[in-house]
Image (cartoon, rainbow, N blue to C red):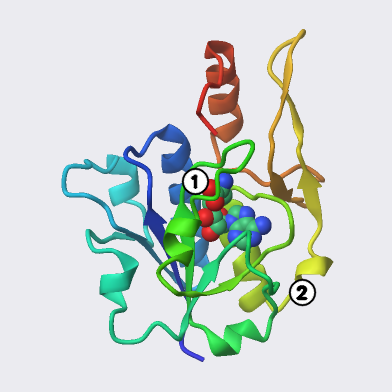
Amino acid sequence: MASKTYIVEHLDDELGPWSELEYLTIARESHEAGAKFCLSSVPPSLELPATLKAAPGFTADGQSVEVLYAQDKSHICLLDPSATKELSPEDGSTFDVFLFGGILGDDPPRDRTSELRKKGFEGRRLGPKQMTTDTAVRVTRMVVQEMVPLEKISYVDYPELRINKNESTEMPFRYVKGSNGEPIMPKGMVDLIKKDSEKGFGDLF
Ligand code: SAM
């Protein structure tokens, strides 16, 4: 089948440093895997960070995914934590576009993916636990491009990050386990988490 496209529909009003690091990582990994990455629904008023605009593999579009693919939705798969079917390697032959909500995770999850579900895309789940957007794209790529079944992927759930000598924070997400046994996170994310947790997380996830 044709090469894969990963679309993140930007659903937040802003694009803060957490999203920037996640999107940079998705752009780089998609590019390395010979896939395309598009950040859709970017409002004209939103000035994208220069690092993102310059990243190989990064493209942005002001239109929403519905408009971009108005002709035919049947080859688009929405990665949806509430879908009843799990993503499988065979889905790589059915779909060539994989759609994700550009939403920072929250705890408990507010199901903002429903904004995309309502538009009638066929959905697949990546297991029962909430992943960060870059993790969801990474897992999808492993399943549909590398043909690894979901249950064969090693994960780290809710890792504890040490902020300083006295404090640590638990990340309320599932991550892919790297070869060093640590959760795979965007470069710079651990430092950002430490910095933000000193200020108090609030609605940062
Ligand atoms: N709290 C969320 C919500 O409001 O829906 C989940 C946001 S999650 C950080 C961002 C995106 O990653 C979701 O919109 C979805 O596309 C994808 N995602 C994350 N975990 C997933 C899972 N277990 N199954 C399917 N998709 C998932």
User: For the point 52% across and 12% down, which residue is it?
Assistant: 199
Q: Secondary structure at mark 2?
A: loop
Local packing at callout 1 (Cα closer than 10 Å; few below 14, some 14-19, many 20+) is: many
| Residue 49 in the image: above or below residue 25 | above
Left or right of 200: which side holds 28?
A: left
Q: Is residue 148 or residue 97 the one in the foreground?
A: 97
- Classify mark 1 as within 8 Å of ligand 1 or not, answering yes or no: no
Q: Which mark is residue 48?
A: none
In the picture as drawn, the residue positioned furthest to the front comes out as 118
Q: Specify whether residue 22 is in view.
A: yes
Residue 120 drawn at (x, y percent): 44, 74
Left or right of 128: which side holds 71?
A: left
Q: Which residue is mark 1?
A: 22
Q: CA distance from mark 2 to mark 1?
A: 23 Å
Q: Which residue is mark 2?
A: 149
Q: Is residue 111 or residue 188 the one in the foreground?
A: 111
User: For the point 22% across and 41% down, which residue is it?
Assistant: 47
Residue 179 drawn at (x, y percent): 78, 52
User: For the point 56% across and 42% down, which residue is it?
Assistant: 105
Local packing at callout 2 (Cα closer than 10 Å; few below 14, some 14-19, many 20+) is: some
Q: Earlier in the sequence, mark 2 or mark 1?
A: 1
Residue 38 drawn at (x, y percent): 36, 63
